[in-house]
Image (cartoon, rainbow, N blue to C red):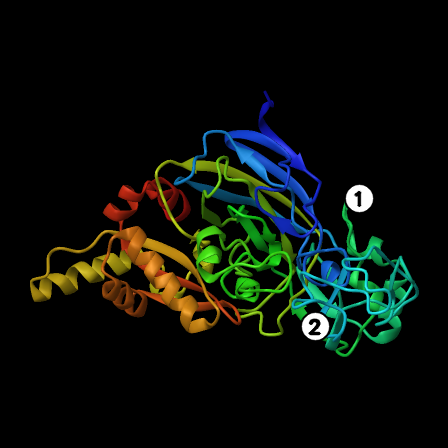
Amino acid sequence: MAEIRDEIGVFDYSGGIVGPGIAPAATIKDGGLIRSGTPPGCWGPMITPKFQGGHEVTKPVMIDGAEIGDAVAIHLNRVRVTSLATSSGVMEFVDGRYIGDPFVAKLCPECGTTAPASHIEGIGDDAVHCDVCNAEVNAFRFSNGYVIVLDEKNQVSLTVNKQAAEKIAADAEVNASIPEHSDQHSILALARADIAGLAAKVQPFLGNIGTIPSRDLPDSHNAGDFGSFLIDAPHGYSFTQAELEQHKTDGHMDTNSVREGAILICPVKVAGAGVYMGDMHAQQGNGEIAGHATDVSGEVELKVDVIKGLEIDGPILLQRLDDLPFLAKPMSAADRSAVQALGKKYGQHEIEDNAPITFIGSGANLNDATENGLRRAASTTGLPYDEILNRATIAGSIEISRLPGVVRVTFLCPRSILKKMGILHLIEAQYG
């Protein structure tokens, strides 16, 4: 019998796939700690032809006692950037170098090898070469891209010019802090520098984190929007819409408030849950409007708790207090006093005792994602769907996490319902 540990360090990665077919890294106790050094997501795996997903996430960690129909609370204790630089931008596909989906089924245009091993030669767009025939094999291009240097200590960043980008590219893996067991090429090798001198704040978060789906699928497609590309796909990871909805866990959220100090509650769709993480971003505004943000290596520490009997279809997020939308923030003592006076004036003496909660919704587009999040909220809380609409309107918000289809549905929910769900203790720890 495998040892059940109190904590585990995970420094092996899944090669672009999440699901029960990936051998777990370990099993830990309920309440245990998971530590990892995560490699960059998106662009590195995208330009590495052997990857069958757009990220490089950790192998899953199983939790003793987690059963199908439970949920797992993931406390993000530490999320810190280790990369010195990264590169990102708006993508274009290169025709003839993939089957149906360049994230999942890459192809060498010369020798026809699918998912070929590859290597880097030189610097620039044509730096990725097939190991079989040495043809240039990258299935992606930047239509507009940048190299950005990072100061994690002071939480600032700066895009650099072409000369600096090429100097960084000469030692790409060191500047990206690629972990030892990572298999991706560094996107810094392309040295694209269309924007120079743009300064920005750094606020890291995890773009892909959660529990494994109940069927293997590409890690970047574990959500309703990217997952829609798997519907009747011509490669080995084809799903029907019903199968996708059944198996996915919406770990790929790109939700910028899934950061240090947040608590993420995830569904358990396989025995043991299988907690995984990756795709850290140094910063990203709501929507990830460019399609990709600043993917970095990073240090992560998570604490996991099983919530028995909380059957959910997708993630629930307890955001940091400073990330909550204004209308969903808990009232101060002065606010409550004013509300009591207002109620007394009009004879409304009963005042609801409530707290904020956020449901993640995903779908092929933002309308579908919003409805998905609202219906998840209604199903889980037992509140009428139309009441959820009202609560999200006057005591909450709908916020875009990612285009084309991931949203946050936040509203103030009665504490009696949160207690029945088995998460009131988490709410009280998060918000007081």
Examine the image and state in which quarter residue 88 appears: bottom right
Q: Is residue 333 above or below residue 89?
A: above
Which residue lies most toward the top here? 1
From the top left corner, tell me how far across and down residue 311 is, in percent. 36, 44
Q: Which residue is mark 2?
A: 89
Q: In the image, 397: left or right of 199?
A: left
Q: Which mark is residue 289?
A: none
Q: Earlier in the sequence, mark 2 or mark 1?
A: 2
From the top left corner, tell me how far across and down residue 218 is, in percent. 62, 55
Q: Amino acid at mark 1?
A: Glu
Q: Which residue is mark 1?
A: 180
* Secondary element at tag 2: strand
Q: Amino acid at mark 2?
A: Gly
Which residue shows up at 50% across the image and 39% down it?
A: 273
Which residue shows up at 63% across the image and 32% down it?
A: 8
Examine the image and state in which quarter residue 196 appears: bottom right
